[in-house]
């Protein structure tokens, strides 16, 4: 799957790329509606699964260890954002049930400001002289919304054997 950045004049996502989350949610079903594969579905606790294809950066502090706090990050250990007029490819292996002739592939490019737990941790780190409840009416971190940036559904034929889609 190819994810293109055709409109933004900057990388996607931009700014706090180690905090912001942009990922693919993928679902594949055979011609009988049976689920073959999923990736990127948000868990009940708001987390993303380990097998998700994300487009972001991993921050490091000056000690060269993982860091997420924006005021600690000095460099990136990986940078997987999508450049302007550029693209990133995502690959998913699928074992099709024997005899499958068609597969319905549904893909969503999803975005949210941060992982829910990260947002909660960052708000706990607000300096003590700032009273979020008094100044902003914030008593708890709301559930961060997820925005579907793009959505595509395609039916593809299984060709070249039971495990290859063309």
Image: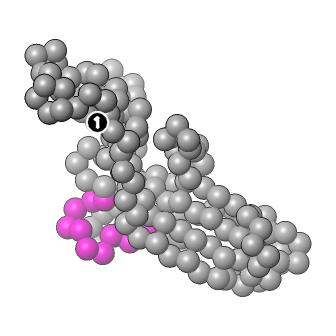
Residue 43 can be seen, yes or no: yes
Quadrant in the picture for the C terminus: bottom right
Residue plotted at (80% across, 83% down): 101
Taking the spot 59% from the left edge, 81% from the top edge, the residue there is 154
Observer-nearest residue: 14 or 161?
14
Kindly identify the residue that appears in the image at 14 percent across and 22 percent down.
131
Q: Residue at x 50, y 60 (%)?
A: 24
Q: Quadrant of residue 72?
A: top left
Which residue range is magenta in the image? 3-12
Residue at the spot of label 1: 75
The image shows residue 61 at horizontal and vertical percentages of 30, 26
Residue 50, above or below 89: above
Left or right relative to 139: residue 96: right
Query: Would residue 5 be counted in the magenta stretch?
Result: yes
Q: Residue 29's image quarter?
A: bottom right
x, y (%) of residue 144? Answer: 36, 45
């Amino acid at each position: 799957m190819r994810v293109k950045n055709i409109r933004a004049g900057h990388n996607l996502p931009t700014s706090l790329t180690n905090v912001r989350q942009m990922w693919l949610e993928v679902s594949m079903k055979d011609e009988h509606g049976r689920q073959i594969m999923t990736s990127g579905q948000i868990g009940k606790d708001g987390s993303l699964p380990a097998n998700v294809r994300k487009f972001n950066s991993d921050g490091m502090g000056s000690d060269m260890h993982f860091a997420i706090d924006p005021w600690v990050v000095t460099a990136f250990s990986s940078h997987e954002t999508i450049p302007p007029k550029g693209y990133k490819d995502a690959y998913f292996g699928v074992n099709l049930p024997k005899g499958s002739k068609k597969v319905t592939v549904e893909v969503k490019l999803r975005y949210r400001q941060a992982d829910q737990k990260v947002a909660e941790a960052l708000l706990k780190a607000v300096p003590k002289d700032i009273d979020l409840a008094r100044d902003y009416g914030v008593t708890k971190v709301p559930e961060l919304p997820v925005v579907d940036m793009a959505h595509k559904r395609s039916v593809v034929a299984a060709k070249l054997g039971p495990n290859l889609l063309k």
